[in-house]
């Protein structure tokens, strides 16, 4: 039954997410909004398609039946004692009455066992489903870790530590003041609510910035450093809050009696493990995986590292979220990094959809409809308050005022990791049930509006475009590509990693030249990368991509993409960068061949013309054979 309940739940969630995603794409809305809204619709506070309310009703009924059954058992035992002391004259009647009573008890017990089996299956499936959905956010954080290299960590250290401390300190401190002055919650409840408000959604903000094309900007990287500090700060918060709230802390896992020294030692050990694993990946494991030339082993190894680092983090008393980030960092900055990210992406998208749907399922519509003004005022106030604190922190760290306001507003939601603290505060009695429900709505609603909030903040707040620092021709090359160019007799850039691009690359390599392949899809580049051929993932019409592929050092450029419009854009970009570079381009239709030549291609190989020429040659051959036979006759 457990498997059946789990499969039904997963099917409902994925089907709901699929329909919501299609509708959102149709109306050009972020799918994340659809996931959260459909989760609220199918959750216990809405249609309850997964039967969570039914399970709760069954649990309550089971408790009442057990209580009644215990009372009946006591009554039966009392009667049986009286019957044993009665005269033999009434023994026969007593035995007749005992059988039906025993049968009734057996029927009740059987019904209770069936009901308990249903409850256990539902609760077990719910726990499995929670684990699956939490895996989605781990995959999102894993993708962030892959992109966030040590160089970026060093560049954003000021924002990560100074900005993170200022943002969290301001948010928590002012929340305590507001709770004491306005609501009378007290400083303990204010500390818990401030900790909840201080945490943002690293995964959702990064995803929204990535969709907006801003994830690689300096402002976004600085803001991401601040978000990573929040994830790190969750560890000491979970260490402090149980003691402040009066909850008995679990000290069984401490290596040292002092919890702060224990946490410091474990954190240092965890960092050492990450650095050692990263070095091992770059020098030993990744080169060995590249020689195997199989995608299966790459995916399996990436998942093993992800789960393994989460287990290590959990064993050391840290959050699995930090383990997922660390796994990404450990697998970053090597020749298979882009391939790993591309191969894991389908799993990441599917599991993250389930995660955001499960977040939406936490919304209780009955409470929201019963207190609409309170919920809306709390949402607006919390978002504005947190945006102000985050903007001040970013501004103090040196970000321009408009950029600080835009990115401070982008992280003004309450993150998914804050649910742990919110539940902890309610369990300890630090906050009332209505405060818990209000903050739960504020958290889910702020997550729902985050994609649009990021889009509006980064486009409508008058933020000045970033000044892109142009690298020199040599600095744009990776050390591996620079070394190969120096050793080879020539260098060629091939745009398009299809069958034609592979044939061209193989022939150039056999002539002693170095080749760099460029393709938009990293999966297409994976086999070339495994064979040691330098590759660059990206749009071949992007000048930064062409620069990274070594176009300034190239002796020739081959454009082999199968779409003429894309080929035209590549030729134009390459010709603007290198006016004298020989360019050979592929065209599918003869109509586009003159356009490619005017754009700067020295030679254009048209598929239509080549096919027509081959067909004509074939017809001439057949005609010659037919004519020879006719002459013989």
Image (spheres, rainbow, N blue to C red):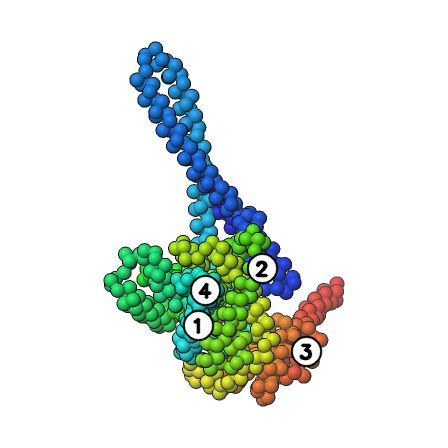
The residue carrying mark 2 is 373
- Looking at the picture, how far across and down is residue 534, in whole percent? 47, 76
- Looking at the picture, how far across and down is residue 486, in whole percent? 43, 85
- Horizontal relation, residue 572 to residue 262: left or right: right
Pick the front one: 57 or 568: 57
- Looking at the picture, how far across and down is residue 132, in whole percent? 46, 54
Earlier-in-chain disc, 1 versus 4: 1
The residue carrying mark 1 is 170
Instruction: Quote the CA–CA distance across marks 1 and 4.
Output: 14 Å
Helix, strand or loop at disc 1? Answer: helix
Whether residue 83 is visible:
yes
Earlier-in-chain disc, 3 versus 2: 2
Helix, strand or loop at disc 3? Answer: helix
The C terminus lies in quadrant: bottom right
The residue carrying mark 4 is 179
Helix, strand or loop at disc 4? Answer: helix
Q: Residue at x 51, y 45 (%)?
A: 53
């Amino acid at each position: 039954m457990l498997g059946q309940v789990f499969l039904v739940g997963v099917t409902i969630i994925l089907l709901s997410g699929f329909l919501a995603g299609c509708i959102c794409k149709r109306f050009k809305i972020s799918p994340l909004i659809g996931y959260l809204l459909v989760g609220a619709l199918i959750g216990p506070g809405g249609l309850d398609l997964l039967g969570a309310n039914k399970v709760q009703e069954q649990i309550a009924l089971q408790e009442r039946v057990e209580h009644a059954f215990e009372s009946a058992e006591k009554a039966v035992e009392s009667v049986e004692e009286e019957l044993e002391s009665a005269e033999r004259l009434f023994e026969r009647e007593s035995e007749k009455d005992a059988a039906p009573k025993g049968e009734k008890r057996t029927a009740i017990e059987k019904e209770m066992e069936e009901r308990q089996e249903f409850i256990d299956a539902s609760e077990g499936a719910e726990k499995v489903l929670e684990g699956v959905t939490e895996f989605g956010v781990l995959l999102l954080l894993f993708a962030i870790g892959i992109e966030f290299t040590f160089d970026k960590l060093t560049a954003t250290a000021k924002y990560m530590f100074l900005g993170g401390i200022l943002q969290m300190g301001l948010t928590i401190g002012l929340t305590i003041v507001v709770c004491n002055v306005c609501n009378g919650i007290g400083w303990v409840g204010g500390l818990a609510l401030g900790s909840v408000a201080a945490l943002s959604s690293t995964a959702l903000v990064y995803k929204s910035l990535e969709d907006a094309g801003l994830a690689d900007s300096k402002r976004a990287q600085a803001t991401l450093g601040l978000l990573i500090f929040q994830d790190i700060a969750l560890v000491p918060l979970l260490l402090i809050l149980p003691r402040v709230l009066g909850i008995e802390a679990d000290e069984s896992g401490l290596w040292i009696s002092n919890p702060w020294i224990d946490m410091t030692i474990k954190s240092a050990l965890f960092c050492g493990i990450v650095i050692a694993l990263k070095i091992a990946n770059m020098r030993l494991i990744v080169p060995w995986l590249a020689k195997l030339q199989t995608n299966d082993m790459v995916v399996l190894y990436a998942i093993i590292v992800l789960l393994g680092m989460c287990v290590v983090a959990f064993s050391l008393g840290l959050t699995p979220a930090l383990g997922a980030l660390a796994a990404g960092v450990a697998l970053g900055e090597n020749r298979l990094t882009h391939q790993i990210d591309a191969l894991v992406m389908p799993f990441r998208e599917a599991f993250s959809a389930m995660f955001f749907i499960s977040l939406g399922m936490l919304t209780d519509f009955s409470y929201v409809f019963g207190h609409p003004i309170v919920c809306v005022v709390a949402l607006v106030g919390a978002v504005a308050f947190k945006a102000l604190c985050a903007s001040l922190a970013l501004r103090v760290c040196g970000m321009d005022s408009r950029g600080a306001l835009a990115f401070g507003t982008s992280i003004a939601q309450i993150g998914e990791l804050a649910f742990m603290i919110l539940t902890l505060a309610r369990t300890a009695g630090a906050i009332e049930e209505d405060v818990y429900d209000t903050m739960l709505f504020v958290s889910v609603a702020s997550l729902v509006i985050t994609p649009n909030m990021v889009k509006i903040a980064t486009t409508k707040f008058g933020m000045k475009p970033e000044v892109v620092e142009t690298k020199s021709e040599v600095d744009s090359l990776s050390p591996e590509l620079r070394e190969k160019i120096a050793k080879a007799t020539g260098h060629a850039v091939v745009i398009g990693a299809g069958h034609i691009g592979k044939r061209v690359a193989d022939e150039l390599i056999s002539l002693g030249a170095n080749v760099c392949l460029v393709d938009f899809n990293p999966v297409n580049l994976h086999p070339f990368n495994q064979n040691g051929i330098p590759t660059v993932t990206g749009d071949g019409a992007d000048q930064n991509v062409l620069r990274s592929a070594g176009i300034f050092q190239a002796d020739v450029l081959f454009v082999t993409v199968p779409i003429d419009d894309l080929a035209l854009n590549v030729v134009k970009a390459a010709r603007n960068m290198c006016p004298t570079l020989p360019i050979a381009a592929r065209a599918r239709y003869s109509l586009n061949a003159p356009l490619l030549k005017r754009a700067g291609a020295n030679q254009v190989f048209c598929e239509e013309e080549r096919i027509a020429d081959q067909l004509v040659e074939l017809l001439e051959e057949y005609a010659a054979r037919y004519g020879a036979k006719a002459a013989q006759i």
